[in-house]
Amino acid sequence: MAVFVADHPLIKHKLGLMRKHDISTKNFRELASEVARLLTYEATKDLETEKKTVQGWAGPVMVDVIKGKKITVVPILRAGLGMQDGVLDLIPGAKVSVVGFYRNEETLQPVEYYVKLAKNINKRMALILDPMLATGGTLDATIRCLKNAGCTSIRGLFLVAAPEGLKRITEAHPDVDIYVAAVDERLNENGYILPGLGDAGDKIFGTK
Ligand code: URA
């Protein structure tokens, strides 16, 4: 697996703004979308293209078109929805596959409560969206769900990751590529990333 940590000044600046304790819902939501858009640019840099001839204004002209698998974005409910629009701005034709998990309080394991995947997911590249890669438990469950459905090409886009979650995913899924705006210091005892962003879902939905 490859882990790509963004080094773009715009991404760093925008993430810095998102860390402020008194950021408004509006600003947090807009910035989550903007950083998702910039991460999408990075995560699609290596897509293969092929030549095609189209009729241009002065006659036939060779253009580049993206070749290979079509894309499905996979927001993890609910916070992943806050990244969806930014990604779809750049890949407007992508299908949306949605997954949701809750935590079983006895086993502490994620349990699926909603899964609706795009048709022919085995022929698509999946871009998983979640602002926070914390323990990696939900991400691991999402990747397993996609693999069980036949998906063989999986990338994940995150605003902030904890080293603990990254380690877990890189060990369990060496075939999945991770794109992240920042890798922070650690998880606290409640599974929140430090310094992190706080509860990204609450901040995106204005429920804090
Ligand atoms: N989910 C969040 O929203 N924030 C964290 O820091 C970890 C998980």
Image: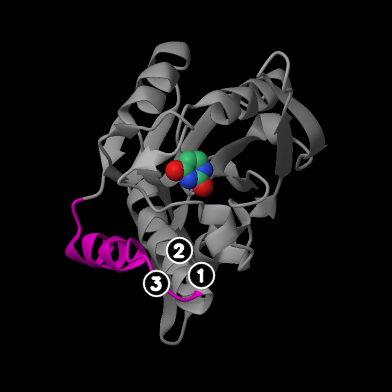
Left or right: 2 with respect to 108? left
Query: Are there few (<14), some (14-19), or many (20+) residues within 10 Å of tag 1?
Result: many
Where does the C terminus fall, quadrant-wise? bottom right
Left or right: 37 with respect to 12? right
Identify the element where label 1 is drawn: helix
Q: Residue at x 56, y 24 (%)?
A: 137
The location of residue 174, given as percent across then percent down, is: 41, 16
Q: Which residue is mark 1?
A: 29
Query: Are there few (<14), some (14-19), or many (20+) residues within 10 Å of tag 2?
Result: many
Q: Is residue 19 magenta?
A: yes
The location of residue 200, given as percent across then percent down, is: 51, 54
Q: Residue at x 73, y 39 (%)?
A: 100
Q: Which residue is mark 3?
A: 22
Label 3 is placed on what type of residue? Asp
Identify the element where label 3 is drawn: loop
Magenta stretch in the rendered image: 7-24
The location of residue 86, given as percent across then percent down, is: 50, 65
Residue 24 against residue 201 in the figure, above or below:
below
